[in-house]
Amino acid sequence: MPATRPLSLLDLATVRSEDTIAEAFDRSRRLARTADGLGYTRIWFAEHHNMPHIASSATALMIQHIAAATENLRVGAGGIMLPNHAPLTVAEQFGTLETLFPDRIDLGLGRAPGTDPPTMRALRRDGSEAQHFEQDVLELNGYLSGFSRIPGVNAYPGLRTHVPLYILGSSLFGAQLAAKLGLPYAFASHFAPQMLSEAAQSYRAHFDASNSLLGPDAEPHFIAAANVVAADEEEAALDQRRRAEDGWIRAMLGRGRRLSDEDVTALRDHPAGQQVLGMLSETSAGTADQVTAWLDAFGDRVGADELILVNLAPEEQAKHRTLELLAPVPQPQSTSP
């Protein structure tokens, strides 16, 4: 049976060691096209910089690429790291996307830089920009709603496009800000699950519809992220999960050097490896029934209105099969490429 909540996808346009970036883009497009006909609600791409295994740094361009290749999915940012950008520029970019693809664009906003300090300096940022996150969100909303907070300055395109905003986070700060502004909130529990339950409770307890940027009828909408791998046989899913975990250990602990299989096996039992694996604690791998049951229980546990899935399967065919098996509407037998 399909999951009881809307299901969406988060894609980082992952570049595998044997791939080119162009191949990563093509793989994301194929995956989005598969999801497009399966009843998934949205697909988001995240802004990261100076990470050789993530190709979604020019997030607005990635969104355009995927929106042009799909018909039904909402496509958006999960998210744009707002301290890296002028709100006017973001409004112009996403106003353009909304004009090109009406009623299909989302704009999730994060407060972190999405990179390390040297790269942040290369972006001409010093870290203090995050202090103005709330003001930047309000300024951005003003451009998109047609009520600019800077007299005489408007976003063209962007003016009155009303691109929906989402606050992203992995701590209480994002939950509290989303509640204060009456906006939807998405929690990054796919890699930072420690404060998930507390943030979910805080968001609902303090949601202020009277102050909502969406109007007095706004209701809380909480999205929780989870990692998944589904396969026809449990053993195959568990194998894909282990390979994905090994990839995380290589990426997080390799520090610029290639780790052998023996190195990775040893690190799985090392405190550093255990810390990496702990980041992936909100993960389910198994058959369709097993993963669906886990997703329903997970959603119930944190009070999620929607789940956004990170497809951990390293192999492309396994990624497509995961989407088919977890599809929100029943589908025929596999049509994976």
Image (cartoon, rainbow, N blue to C red):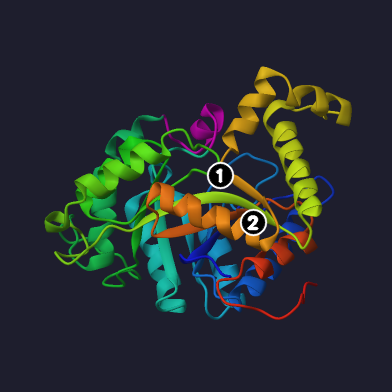
Residue 93 visible in the shown view:
no
Q: Position of residue 140 (x, y in %)?
A: 29, 56
Secondary structure under the numbered disc 1 in the rendered image: loop
Q: Position of residue 296 (x, y in %)?
A: 50, 57
| The stretch drawn in magenta includes residue 26 | no
Residue 290: mark in rendering: 2
Question: Residue at the location (60% across, 69% down)?
Answer: 65
Residue 254 quadrant: top right
Q: Residue furthest left?
A: 210
Question: Residue at the location (70% across, 26% down)?
Answer: 253
**Vertical position of residue 154 compared to residue 237: above or below:** below
Residue 48: mark in rendering: 1
**Vertical position of residue 337 compared to residue 17: above or below:** below
Q: How crowded is mark 2: few (under 14 residues within 10 Å), some or many (20 or more)?
A: few
**Are discs 2 and 1 less than 8 Å apart at CB?**
no
Which quadrant does the C terminus fall into? bottom right
For marks 2 and 1, the one nearer the N-term is 1
Residues drawn in magenta: 115-126
Amino acid identity at mark 1: His
Question: Residue at the location (26% across, 72% down)?
Answer: 160
